[in-house]
Amino acid sequence: MHPPVRLACVATVLWASAAVAQQVPESADQVAQLGGTLPGNPDIELVKVVDGLHDPTDVTSAGDGSGRLFVTERVGRVKVVKDGELLDKPFLDLTTMNPLGSFVQTQFMEQGLYSVAFHPDFAENGHFFVHYASLPFNGDGMIVRFTVSDDDPDVADPESAKVVMQIDQPYYNHNGGEIGFGPDGYLYIGSGDGGWEGDPLEAGQDLSTWLGKILRIDVDTEDGPYTVPADNPFVEKQQLMRLFGITEDVFADIHTRAKAEIWAYGLRNPYQFSFDRETGDLYIAEVGQNHWEEIDFQPASSEGGENYGWDFNMGTHCFPIDEESCPTVGTLPIAEYPHDEGGCSVIGFGVANYAGMNGVYLFGDWCTGRVWGTGWDQEAGRWQMQELAQASLNFTGGGYGDDGAVYAVNCDCFYTTDKGAMENPPGALWKIVAADSVPEGATTATQQQE
């Protein structure tokens, strides 16, 4: 632990909240809780698109106008959904290889293939990126670039692999999560705190590690794996002094050890995050420990450097949870829910700007299958959170289609060291639609649970 860095982190909230006081909660009573109502009181349904997926973890589109959806499977495959059908041949298959010559397949559910992100210029350069953690490398997080094949747009070239980043992992959980390109064209990477429980390495508040962070890198380079954007918050002296407003001595300590790739910190397990495709705002589904789940927010106007509080706080609460009082460190979440009422693990889907929703971040829970939305209520001047569906599905991820529609994936993903994902019941892909727009004959999540 590095006390000077932890002390400096407390000051971040003074800068972050002052710039966006109209949207970032300034006190715990402004954080959305269960039981609220969103503007317009939206009514949604989840419609099944395809099933037969083995432990799906994420879904996205290529942004090339093809309308295809790409679903990552934890076992190491990227599957294609084309014209409403699941193609037999994977887009990418890492089940028997990866760029470092070993299996992606793992026996622990927080390892494997997490996410795929397509370059903003994919239609021209054919580049896409995957994030996975592989057991033979102690679950280290691997960010790898591939290129689509010249012969078939539905198949990648497995020989095109270029390792972009390898994130050392000390334990076998919280090994990784979402990757995605922001509206600025940079690649954002969700990195957990390294695992175990209680953040024993104090990684969330330690600026000398990539763990417990959102990272931001520029992959448009051929001179190396990546470069660091010049405006990342921990690159230059001016940015650091603006963030912390502290003495030169403390600044020197931070500047010497801070990782330049860090965009935001104080996170436990940012397994999913989403950009609002209309505003550029960033929403982070932050998985908590045993008691609370939270949704963190970064406005598009942010210059980075937010501290989301872990492991001082969990949501608006102290950590450890039995502490009677504690300071609020960093930026408060916009919404939270307790395990004894809502579930156990928040799973982010995406921001809906349709079906009566305007900038509503949709998310579910892995244990209960409940689906909520959180959004800004201009009239009330605060965030609201409303339960929108009870699906009784084990949600595992979500993302966008080409047209901005929000999707979710689920599977019955419980297994042990002698049972891998291929032995689980197949999972499915679901599209979130207005309740009055369900296609005739479609299977819905509420029908499935009856």
Image (spheres, grey):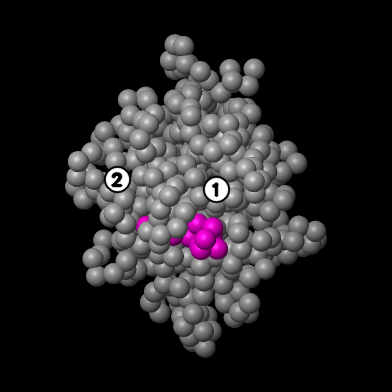
The image position of residue 58, as x and y in percent, is: 46, 42
Q: Position of residue 322 (x, y in %)?
A: 80, 59
Q: Is residue 338 above or below residue 446?
A: below
Q: Secondary structure at mark 1?
A: strand
Q: Identify which amino acid the numbered label 2 is placed on.
A: Ala
Asked if residue 403 can be seen in this view, the reply is no
Secondary structure category for the residue under label 2: strand
Q: Which residue is mark 1?
A: 285
319 is within the stretch colored magenta: no
The spot of residue 323 in percent (x, y) is 79, 62
Quadrant (top left/top right/bottom left/bottom right) for the N terminus: bottom right
Total marks in image: 2
Residue displayed at 23% across by 38% down: 152
Residue in front for this viewpoint, 180 or 111: 111
Q: Nearer the viewer, mark 2 or mark 1?
A: 2
- What residue is disc 2 on? 156
Residue 411 lies in what quarter of the image?
A: top right
**As drawn, is 102 to the left or to the right of 204?**
left
Magenta segment: does it hold 139? yes
Of 446 and 175, the residue lying toward us: 175
- Between the C-alphas of marks 2 and 1, the distance is 30 Å
Asked whether 374 or 96 is in front, the reply is 96
Amino acid type for the residue under numbered disc 1 = Ala
Would you place residue 376 above or below residue 308 in this image?
A: above
The residue at the far top in this view is 440
- 10 Å crowding of disc 2: few (<14), some (14-19), many (20+): many
Observer able to see residue 446: yes
Residue at horizontal 65%, vertical 65%?
199
**Mark 1 crowdedness (10 Å alpha carbons): few <14, some 14-19, many ≥20:** many
- The residues colored magenta run 134-144
In-front residue for pair 294/279: 294
